[in-house]
Amino acid sequence: MSKRQLDSVKRLSLGERRLMSPRAKRDMWAFIGFTAPNFILLGIFVFWPIVYSLFLSFFKWNMIAPKKTFIGFQNYHTMFTDPVFWQVTKNTLILAFFTVVVKLAIALGLALAMNKHIRGRSVYRAIIFSPTFTTSVAIAMVWSWIFEPTFGLLRVFMKPFGIPPIDWLESVTHSLPAVIIVLIWSGIGYDMVLFLAGLKNISLEIYDAALVDGVSPWQNFWYITFPLLSPTTFFLTITGFIGALKAFDIVAIMTDGGPLNSSNVIVHFLYQNAFQWFKTGYASALALILFIIIMAITLVQNRLSSRWVHY
Amino acid sequence: MSRGIIGRKNANWFIGRTVTHLILIVATLVIGLPFFWMLTTALKSPVEVAIFPPIWWPETIRWDNFVTAWKTAPFGRFYINSIITAVSGVILEVSIAALSAYAFARIKFKYRNFFFMVMLAAMMIPGQIALIPNYVILSKLKWINTYQGIVIPHVSSVFGAFLLRQYFLSVPESLYDAAEIDGLGHTKTMFYVALPLARPVLGTLVLYLFISKWNSYLWPLIVTTKQHMRTLPVGLAMVRSAEYSIGPEHLMAASIFVLVPVLIVYFIAQKQLIEGIAAGAVKG
C-alpha cells in the first residue's frame, strides 16, 4: 500500500469514528436497548450494594431512624475484637472445609461406580441428584425430625453400635456436625453429576493404551483418571467452598446458629445483626468482609487454575 | 487357556457389577430415606410418631394430617404467593437474559467486550452483600411486603444470559445472514430465528429458574413481614417457629405441600435438568 492509500484509509476510519454510519448507529441503540434492563437491574441490585455497604459500614444505624451516626472504623474494630465474630468465622471455615472434602470424595466414588453401562443407572442418578432441587427449608424440616434425640430416625442407626441418644441440634459439640451432614447429603448429587460429565470427557483411548501396558486399576485411577479430572475437581472445590461460605437456610431452620453460636455461620450472623438486632452498620461490615473473602478466593482461583489443573 | 482367562474375567466382572450396584443402592437409600421418612411421618397418628424404635409405615394411613396441616396456616395464600412470584420472576428473568444474550451474541458495538466483562464481574459478587442495601432501596420504594419487592431484585441475569449467548453464537451464521437479507431487524431476528432455535436450552433455563425461585428462602424472608405476603418456604418455616405449635406429622405434611410442585417438575424433566446442569457448568 502506498503512503497516500494509507492516509486515505486512516482518514476514512477517522471519519467513521466521528460520524457513525447509520447502521452502526442503529446497532448501538439496539445494543443499549437490549441490554439496558439487565444493566439497570445489575447496577441497582448488585453493584450499587457494594458501594452502599462500604458506606454503611462506617456508620451506626438501626435501619429505621432517619439519622446515621458516623463512627469511622468502629464497626470493624468491634468485629475484630468480638469473640463471637471469630467463632462464627471459625465455624464457617470448618463447615466449608468438611462439607467440600467429604462431599467431593463420596461424589467422586459414586461417579466412578456409575460411569459404566449398568442397569438402573438413570434411576440411581435421578434419586441421588434430587436433593439439589429440593426446597432447603423442607430438607431442614425433615432432618430436624431425623436428628430428634428420642424418636429420631438417626437413633435407629446409632443404637446397634451402642451410641447413646444425642441431642444433635441442642448440643454445643454436635450442632455444627449436624448441619455439615445435611449439607453433604444435599450436595453429593450435584458434584457426582459434574464428575460424571468430567469422566465422559476423558478419551477411552488412554485407558486402552494403559490396558496394553498392563496398568492396574489403582494406577489407572491415580495416574490417568484423577489428573484428567482435575479441572472438574478444582471447579467443584472452589464453587463448593464459596457456596458453603454462603450457607444460611439449613442453619437458620435447624439450629438458628445455636446453641451458644456453636453452629452460627457468617451469613446467618449477618442476618441476625441486620434484621433481628438492627445493627445495620456492623452487619454491613460483615457483608464487606464476606465479599472480600469470596473475591480473594475467586482471584486466587483465576491465578492458580492454569498452574494446578492438567488439561 | 483362553477360556480360562475369559472365565476369570467373567467372575471379576460379576463381582465388580455386584459391588457397584451395592454401593449405588446404599447411596440411593441414604439419599432417598429422608424423603420416605417425610412421607411416612406425614401419614402417622400422633401416637405412632412418638414411639421408639419408630415404625416404618403407619397401621392406618392418616390422610387427614394433610387437611389439618393445611389449616394450621394460610397455605392456600402461600401457594398463590409462591406461584405469582416464581412465575413472574421466571418470565422477567428469561426475557432479560434473552435480550442481553442476543445483544452480546449478534449486535456489533464498540464497547461490547467491556460490558461483557462487567456482566461477568457481577457473577462473582455474592448476593448476601446486597441484603441490607436492597432492603433499604425497597423500603424507600415502599416495596416491602409486595410481589415486586420479592421478584424484581432477583431478575437480573448473568448465568442465563451467558448460557443463551453461547447458544445464539452456535447458530449457523448463514441463518442470520438470511434474516438480514430478508430485512429483519434485531428484534424480529431474535424472535423468529434465534429464540426458536434455542428452545431446548430455553426450556431447561425456565425449569431451573422456576425451581430456584420456588425454593428461595432468605430474600422472601427479609422482604415479607406480613403473613399474607409470605411464600411457601417462609410460611413453612414460620409454621414451625413460635407462631404455632404442631406435631411432626403435621409439619412433615406441610413440608410435602411445599415440595410437591418441585418434585413433579423434577421427575418429569430430570434428564433434561441434570444434563443441562452438567453441560452448563462445564462450559461456564
Image: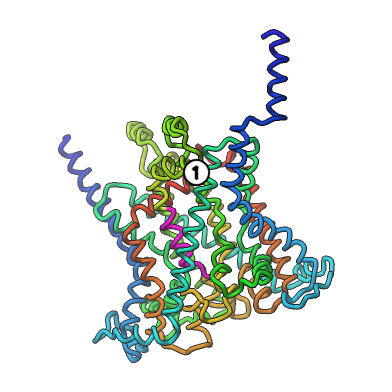
Q: Residue at x 55, y 41 (%)?
A: B104
Task: Give how far across and how far down residue A73 sits, in percent.
Answer: 82, 66
Instruction: Look at the image and name its color scheme.
Output: rainbow
The stretch drawn in magenta includes residue A170: no
Amino acid tagged 1: Thr
Q: Nearer the viewer, residue A79 or A154?
A: A79
Q: Quadrant of the N terminus of chain B?
A: top left
Q: Which of the 4 image quarters holds residue A18?
A: top right
Question: Is A193 drawn above or below residue B106 in the view shown?
Answer: below
> What is the residue that sits farthest to the top in this orientation?
A2
Mark 1 neighbour class, 10 Å CA radius: few under 14, some 14 to 19, many 20 or more: few
Q: Which of the 4 image quarters holds residue B56?
A: bottom left
Q: Residue at x 69, y 23 (%)?
A: A13
Q: Nearer the viewer, residue B231 or A275?
A: B231
The span shown in magenta is: B205-217
Q: Nearer the viewer, residue B166 or A212?
A: B166
Residue B65 shows up from this direction: yes
Task: Give how far across and how far down residue B84 sits, in percent.
Answer: 46, 69
Task: Give how far across and how far down residue B97 sits, in percent.
Answer: 52, 50
Badge 1: chain ID = B
Q: Main secondary structure of the magenta part?
A: helix
Reading the image, the residue beneath label 1 is B187
Residue A182 shows up from this direction: no
Task: Give how far across and how far down residue A132 sits, in percent.
Answer: 43, 61
Q: Nearer the viewer, residue B89 or B182?
A: B182
Q: Is residue A103 left or right of residue B120?
A: left
For the residue labelled by badge 1, is the local secondary structure a helix, a strand or a loop? helix
Q: Residue at x 69, y 60 (%)?
A: A49
The stretch drawn in magenta includes residue B212: yes
